[in-house]
Amino acid sequence: MMKSKWINCKWPILLMAVASMNAANAAEPETALTYNVGVVNNYLYRGISQTRGEPAVQGGLDYAHSSGFYVGAWASSIKWIEDVQPANRANGPTELDLYAGYKFDLAPGLGMDLGYLRYEYLGNNATSVGLTNPNTDEIYLGMNTPLFNVKFSYATSNLFGQTGNAGASATGATYTEFSREFDLGSGYKLTPHAGMTSISKVTDASYNDYSLTLAKEINPGLVLSVGYSATNAIRTYYVSNFNQKYLGDQAAVVGLKYNF
């Protein structure tokens, strides 16, 4: 069983313009610290439910500097670790993501994002019940163009504790994703997304995922989103051992988020 992000669960950092003294020009603040809290009816990451189709509470904070450097943290309730071996009482109820990176313009209209992401599963006892440690490190490179955004992630450690035949590790697993945000007017934004997980050393773990999300700021800072997600993940691999639920099934995702 594996884990999956409503990437959709990490929203872009907003740097607010500050009016100049003569109101003729706007100046970007040197630094910005933002917070967010939210809830979703089903926490999906890369198309795979992290909560066996049940709700999750989430929140995060981001610090960005005008130079392009940023750091942040994001957390969510999860259930997938305890579902791997429910009889042995595997535990790990909270996911904490720690990340840092640098954004810069390579050319006019071509933005780059280079960073590191650590998935930390707080309180997990995976190794004590015979599982591999799910804590994971990834590096990533993103590119934003006027037509689409693309991001490539590479696991420098064993991806989410997955193992294949003869103990083969998922180190070196990759995730490639494409997305684009369309401004529909009246505050509505539509974002199609497609991703490909590739884990060559773990049989049956590779798959593709697709999603479409519509979001609207219904009040200042309060964003409502409605989305649809589907995957072609193999049913016998991405399954909850708690209730035999297929975690990569097509699903509707509704979220409410407040950005401070």
Image: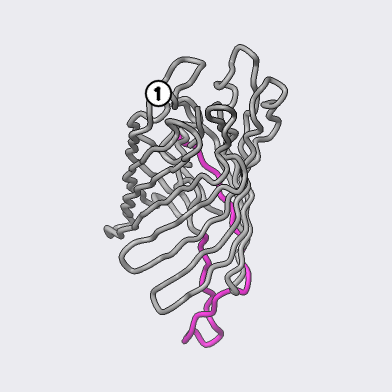
Image-based side of 20 in relation to 256, left or right: right
Quick check: 43 above or below 19? above
Q: Depth check: 114 or 184 in front?
A: 114
Q: Tell me the residue at 40%/51% (across/down).
A: 177
Q: Position of residue 212 (x, y in %)?
A: 31, 45
Q: Depth check: 255 or 115 in front?
A: 115
Q: Position of residue 235 (x, y in %)?
A: 38, 24
Q: Is-magenta flag for residue 255? A: no
Image-based side of 108 in relation to 169, left or right: left
Q: At label 1, which amino acid type do we have?
A: Tyr
Quick check: 251 above or below 9? above
Q: Tell me the residue at 48%/21% (across/down).
A: 240
Quick check: 234 above or below 45? above
Q: Position of residue 195 (x, y in %)?
A: 38, 47
Q: Tell me the residue at 61%/52% (across/down).
A: 61
Q: Position of residue 230 (x, y in %)?
A: 33, 36
- Look at the image and give the residue range highlighted in magenta: 13-40
Secondary structure state at the residue bearing disc 1 = loop
- Residue 36 seen in this snapshot: yes
Q: How many marks?
A: 1
Q: Extreme front residue here? A: 166
Q: Extreme top residue here? A: 87
Q: Depth check: 213 or 163 in front?
A: 163
Quick check: 212 above or below 149? above
Q: Extreme left residue here? A: 184
Q: Would you name the residue on which mark 1 appears? A: 246
